[in-house]
Each structure stands twice: as structure tokens, then as C-alpha cells.
Image (spheres, helix red, strand yellow):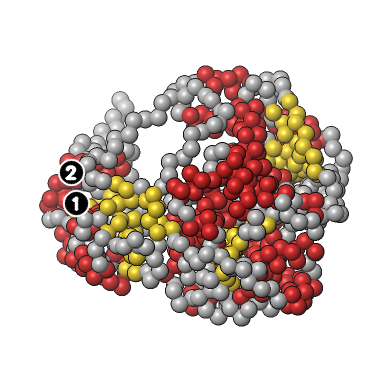
């Protein structure tokens, strides 16, 4: 008879810890908790605020028992160890860390030109309470409170109510402007899709008055300056400048602020390096640019000034920057420079200045604050106008043009929305903006565009299914439609590349990173050697892909997203450019294709635009045509009135 195995005792599961860690500063309690699906909404509704720098939820200080009861109520029915919560809260509140939260709030106080102050910080419940106690009015675009009280009253409220010591509050000396944001003009986009309506908003949740102001700064009105032609001639010879580049340097040197808007590939960086050094003399030059272009700027400076002392914000210590002749910073690092008032600059150049077109962005505000301290300020971009005339307002104000002194509302009324107004704007920009096209490069070949209409043999039904899906909202639906069309062009791309000569090289631009992966795999299967570049690639990987494409004859294709590969790099090994999807503006498209069509290109460049009829492809193409008309009316009208070199 077989002996039965003894029965196994049931396993007792231990409840999970809900509260992983907590910290108190005597005013706030920070709660780091186990992940629970959908808990964020419940915590927000219950009055908690997420503190990103500390990776925890913050609530107002209360007794350990009250907080424990509150958490039990929120997570009732979940399998957590609720008994451990109160002892943990008692332990952290018995040893408060007074500056744990206040030192990372980035509190700044700006004097307003029309009186009062603007107070900004990362979102904090106690700071909100302090601002309300002062009768403050929150402006959502500025992400700041307007307070009509003196600085001592503001500092006192922040200390007594929010617990913020004065050493953590930066009070600016220079005035800023709190200006009303204008509503965007009615859209003329030809893109129409059947989509789900946007979700209904819950409103402000109270009768609290929320303002629509944004922060900027009024700089001194631009003035003309005599140019030392002897020094200019010496610098031009040393830097190997072409005749048209000497004109560009003279344009910058001849005024306190201006815009260099040359077409891509004409050497704007070289002109800017020479001009800013001459303008600064022995002073310090600040170069602001996208993060991906910092190395390019360092190389460009050293090509002209090999012994230059160059500092990188974020890589070098702030103390080191004081000993540098040049300081390079990406837009995301400008917040640190704003606080470093002792680090003075004689000249500032803002590369890819169209990145500042959003008046309400934090980087735009920081650049405005910096501009109020720097005498000479220059904007550099091959795409000064992307979508609307009003985008120029930031650059005009930043560089001290008289039109920048107008309020955003007045500028819109006088210079936007109509062909006659755009003509007046173009007239006003003469002398401030210098723009040349590729025709100044007499040795450069031609660039031509070819439209190719495709009829994919299969797969179009997957696109049509997305079109018929009315559960998607507009933008997510358009994204899915465009992604589907990018994938449908894979066969065409492979066949086109295989039909080219062995020494032909191709850049393929996509709008979505997922497509880059799809194409890389498809090209590998077809024995087409390629490299790729997307926004998540680090600087080393980025440069390795560029160098391989430029120097290795076996690497025939460079695949990249327009946002990552369409700006700031040279890919003159390519003589073909193909757009799997079109960018949203003609300026961005031209900027991308001119990675190949620029100084150093020895061959003609052919740009191929494959379109699938009766799809969103055709609508985007029409949108680009509409925006091209706007660009012609303003930017190209200024160029057309330039004297012949």
C-alpha cells in the first residue's frame, strides 16, 4: 500500500509595503510609494502634488495618524501593509529635513516693468498658499504669479508659509515684461480627418482668476555701429571667409542686434564665430544652441581660433566658465546661467533661433532674461519663419528691433494675417535680417525636386482601417496614418536605392523613430549598408554615424528622423535625399534636404518626394504649399531686396 505524502501547509503571503519611504520638512510630507495603476489621478484629486525632482508625492503636513488614515482611505481594498504606515510617518516627522524640498523649488522673483513682481517656481502646494496670501494672480503661460507687493513681503510670506529661506530665492535686478498672450489665428490647414472629439475639460475647478500673461524682456533699441574694415579684412583672411561671408560678418558687426538668416549650408556658424569675436574684443561670447549642436560649435570655434578657451555649460563647473573666452550652452541649461549674474558676456549669439518661437516656453523666458544683461545680441537661423508671422516677434524683441518694442497684440494687428501687412513687415525687416540663398555659391551644383506618386501593391487597407476609425482623436490619428504610409514606402525606397549607381549615396528622412528601425531591418535584408540617427542617440553614436556615412564608401544610406538629422550636421557625401514623410513646414523640409546641398557638395542633389494619392500625404503637401506662400511674402521678400554682391 502506497504511503500518502503529507499535505503541504498553505503559504501565507506577506502584504506589500505601500509606503516605501517618507520625508518631512515640517511643512510638507513627501511620500514615495509602491506603484499602483491609476493611483496618480486619485492622489491628485485628494490634494497631493507630484514632485518630479524628488520622485515623490507631496502633501501638506499633518499628524502621522491623519496621514495614515488618509492613505488607507485612498488605497482601501488593496493588499498593502497599512499598519506599517503610521510608524514610518512618526519616524520621519521626528527628524524633519528643513531644506529637503525648498532647495529644489527654483524660486525666482522678477521685477515687472509696470510695477509689482512675478514669482516663479516648480509647482509646490505651500508656495501656492504663500502667493494666494499675498493676493497673487497666476499666469499660466508665464508659469508665474503676479504679485503687487514689495519684495520684503514676498520673501516673508515664502519664509513663514512655505518655509523657503532667502538663500534659495533668486531676486532679479533687471525688469521683465508681463504681456498678454494672443490667441492663435484661425487655422487654414487643409488636413481634415474624421476623429473623436477631444475630452471635455473640467475647467479651473474654482472661480480663481487665472491670467494669460507670459514673461519677456524689452532690450535697448538696436543702433548702428561703425565697422573697423582693417580688422575685418584681417579676420576674414585668417578664417578663410568667402566674399559673401565677409558681407555677413559686416552685417553683424554693424549693429547691436540683428538676424543672420542665410540659407542652410552657407556657413552661418563660421560667420557668427568671426563676427562675435570681433564684436566682443577681449570680452566673453555666449553661444546658445540645441544640445546636439554643442560639439559642432566647439569645432567651428577651434577651426578659426585653435587656442580658444571654451567652456560647456553642464560639463564644466561654473567656476571654470569664468576663465573662458567662449561659453556654449544648450537651451535646457540656460536656467543655471540666469542665476549666475557675475558671469558677464559681451556678446550673445542664439543659433537655430526659431526654437524660441514659443513665447510661453521656459527657455524663451530664460533667453530674454539673459538678453537684458548683454549689450550685443544676435539671432542665427536658416528658418526664421516656420508657420506664422508672429513667430518673428520673439527674435525682433530679443535683438532690439523697434518692432520688438510693440506688444504681441499690436504686432499681430499691424503685421500679420494679410498680404499687405506682410509686405509692410518685410519692408521693416530690411537691414535687420540678412538672407542669402545658395546662388551665392557659384561652384555649387543644382538641387531639384521630383514628386513620385506610388500605388503600393498591398498594405493600403491597413491605412484605410485607421482612416475609418473614429474613436481616435485628431492628432493621434494623423500620426498613425502617417506612420502607416511611411512603412508602405519601404519597397519603393529599396527599389530606388538599388537602381542607383554604386557611388550614389542617399539620405532617407522619416518623421517617426519606429520607421527608422523598420527601414534599417529591411535594408539589411536587402544587403544595403546603412547608418541611422534618432533623437535618443548620444553624441558619440551620432558622430560615428555621420563619419561612417561621409567617409566609408560601403555605407550608402543614412536614415534619420527629421528632428534629429535634419539640422546642424553635414552629409555632403549624399547626392540623393528622399522623404518617407514630409515635415510640417517648408523651412524644415529645406533645412533637412540641405544637409546634402551645402558647402563641400561636389555633385548635383536630387530630392525625391514619394506621395501616395488620396491619402494624408497629399494634404500635407498642400499644407506646405500654403506655408511657402507666407514665407515668400516675408522672408524671401527681404532677400529679394538685397543689393547684388
At which x and y percent is residue 497?
79, 37
The residue to which callout 1 is attached is 85
* Label ID, residue 72: 2
Q: Is 594 situated above or below 511?
A: below
At which x and y percent is residue 177?
40, 59
Q: Residues within 10 Å of mark 1 (few under 14, many from 20)?
A: many
User: Does the rendering let one see residue 135?
Assistant: yes
Quadrant in which the C terminus is drawn: bottom right
Picture residue at 43% right of the left edge, 58% below the top: 216
Most foreground residue, 313 or 643: 643
Label 2 near label 1: C-beta < 8 Å? yes
Left or right, 208 with reference to 54: left
Q: Is 223 situated above or below 418?
A: below
The first of marks 1 and 2 along the sequence is 2
Figure quadrant of residue 286: bottom right
Figure quadrant of residue 621: top right
At which x and y percent is residue 470?
47, 21
Amino acid at each position: 500500500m502506497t504511503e500518502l505524502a503529507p499535505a503541504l501547509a498553505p503559504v501565507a503571503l506577506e502584504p506589500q509595503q505601500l509606503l516605501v519611504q517618507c520625508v518631512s520638512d515640517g511643512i510638507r510630507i513627501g511620500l514615495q510609494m509602491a506603484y499602483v495603476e491609476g493611483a496618480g489621478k486619485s492622489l491628485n484629486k485628494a490634494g497631493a502634488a507630484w514632485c518630479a525632482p524628488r520622485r515623490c508625492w507631496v502633501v501638506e503636513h499633518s499628524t502621522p495618524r491623519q496621514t495614515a488614515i488618509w492613505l488607507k482611505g485612498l488605497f482601501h481594498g488593496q493588499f498593502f501593509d497599512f499598519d506599517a504606515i503610521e510608524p514610518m510617518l512618526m519616524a520621519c516627522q521626528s527628524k524633519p529635513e528643513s531644506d529637503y524640498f525648498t532647495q529644489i523649488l527654483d524660486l525666482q522673483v522678477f521685477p515687472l516693468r509696470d510695477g509689482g513682481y512675478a514669482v516663479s517656481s516648480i509647482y509646490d502646494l505651500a508656495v501656492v498658499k504663500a502667493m494666494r496670501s499675498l493676493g497673487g494672480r497666476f499666469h499660466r503661460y508665464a508659469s508665474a504669479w503676479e504679485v503687487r507687493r514689495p519684495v520684503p513681503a514676498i520673501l516673508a510670506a515664502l519664509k513663514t508659509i512655505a518655509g523657503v529661506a532667502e538663500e534659495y530665492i533668486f531676486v532679479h535686478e533687471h525688469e521683465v515684461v508681463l504681456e498678454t498672450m494672443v490667441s492663435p489665428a484661425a487655422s487654414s490647414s487643409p488636413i481634415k480627418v474624421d476623429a473623436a472629439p477631444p475630452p471635455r475639460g473640467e475647467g479651473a475647478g474654482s472661480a480663481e482668476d487665472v491670467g494669460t500673461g507670459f514673461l519677456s524682456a524689452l532690450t535697448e533699441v538696436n543702433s548702428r555701429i561703425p565697422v573697423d574694415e582693417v580688422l575685418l579684412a584681417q579676420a576674414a583672411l585668417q578664417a578663410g571667409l568667402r566674399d559673401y561671408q565677409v558681407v555677413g560678418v559686416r552685417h553683424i558687426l554693424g549693429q547691436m542686434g540683428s538676424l543672420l538668416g542665410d540659407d542652410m549650408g552657407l556657413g552661418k556658424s563660421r560667420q557668427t564665430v568671426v563676427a562675435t569675436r570681433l564684436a566682443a574684443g577681449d570680452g566673453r561670447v555666449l553661444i546658445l544652441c540645441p544640445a546636439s549642436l554643442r560639439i559642432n560649435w566647439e569645432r567651428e570655434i577651434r577651426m578659426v581660433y585653435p587656442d580658444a578657451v571654451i567652456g560647456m555649460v553642464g560639463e564644466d563647473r561654473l567656476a571654470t566658465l569664468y576663465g573662458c573666452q567662449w561659453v556654449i550652452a544648450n537651451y535646457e541649461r540656460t536656467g543655471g546661467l540666469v542665476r549666475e549674474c557675475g558671469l558677464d558676456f559681451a556678446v550673445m549669439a542664439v543659433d537655430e533661433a526659431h526654437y524660441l518661437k514659443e513665447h510661453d516656453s521656459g527657455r524663451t523666458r530664460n533667453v530674454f532674461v539673459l538678453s537684458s544683461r548683454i549689450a550685443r545680441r544676435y539671432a542665427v537661423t536658416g528658418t526664421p519663419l516656420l508657420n506664422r508671422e508672429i513667430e518673428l516677434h520673439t527674435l525682433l524683441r530679443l535683438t532690439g528691433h523697434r518692432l520688438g518694442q510693440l506688444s504681441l497684440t499690436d504686432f499681430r494687428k499691424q503685421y500679420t494675417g494679410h498680404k499687405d501687412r506682410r509686405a509692410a513687415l518685410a519692408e521693416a525687416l530690411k537691414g535687420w535680417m540678412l538672407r542669402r540663398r545658395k546662388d551665392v555659391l557659384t561652384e555649387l551644383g543644382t538641387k531639384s525636386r521630383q514628386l513620385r506618386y506610388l500605388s503600393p501593391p498591398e498594405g493600403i487597407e491597413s491605412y484605410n482601417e485607421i482612416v475609418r476609425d473614429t474613436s481616435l482623436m485628431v492628432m493621434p490619428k494623423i500620426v498613425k496614418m502617417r506612420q502607416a504610409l511611411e512603412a508602405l514606402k519601404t519597397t519603393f525606397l529599396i527599389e530606388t536605392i538599388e537602381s542607383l549607381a554604386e557611388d550614389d549615396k542617399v539620405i532617407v528622412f522619416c518623421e517617426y523613430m519606429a520607421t527608422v528601425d523598420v527601414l534599417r531591418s529591411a535594408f539589411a535584408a536587402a544587403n544595403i549598408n546603412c547608418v541611422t540617427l534618432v533623437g535618443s542617440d548620444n553624441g558619440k553614436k551620432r558622430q560615428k554615424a555621420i563619419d561612417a556615412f561621409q567617409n566609408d564608401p560601403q555605407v550608402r544610406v543614412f536614415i534619420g528622423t527629421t528632428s534629429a538629422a535634419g539640422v546642424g550636421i553635414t552629409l555632403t557625401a549624399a547626392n540623393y535625399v528622399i522623404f518617407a514623410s514630409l515635415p510640417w513646414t517648408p523651412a524644415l523640409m529645406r533645412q533637412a534636404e540641405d544637409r546634402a546641398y551645402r558647402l563641400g557638395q561636389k555633385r548635383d542633389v536630387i530630392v525625391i518626394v514619394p506621395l501616395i494619392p488620396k491619402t494624408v500625404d497629399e494634404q500635407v503637401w498642400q499644407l506646405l504649399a500654403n506655408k511657402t506662400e507666407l514665407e515668400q511674402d516675408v522672408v524671401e521678400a527681404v532677400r529679394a531686396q538685397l543689393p547684388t554682391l
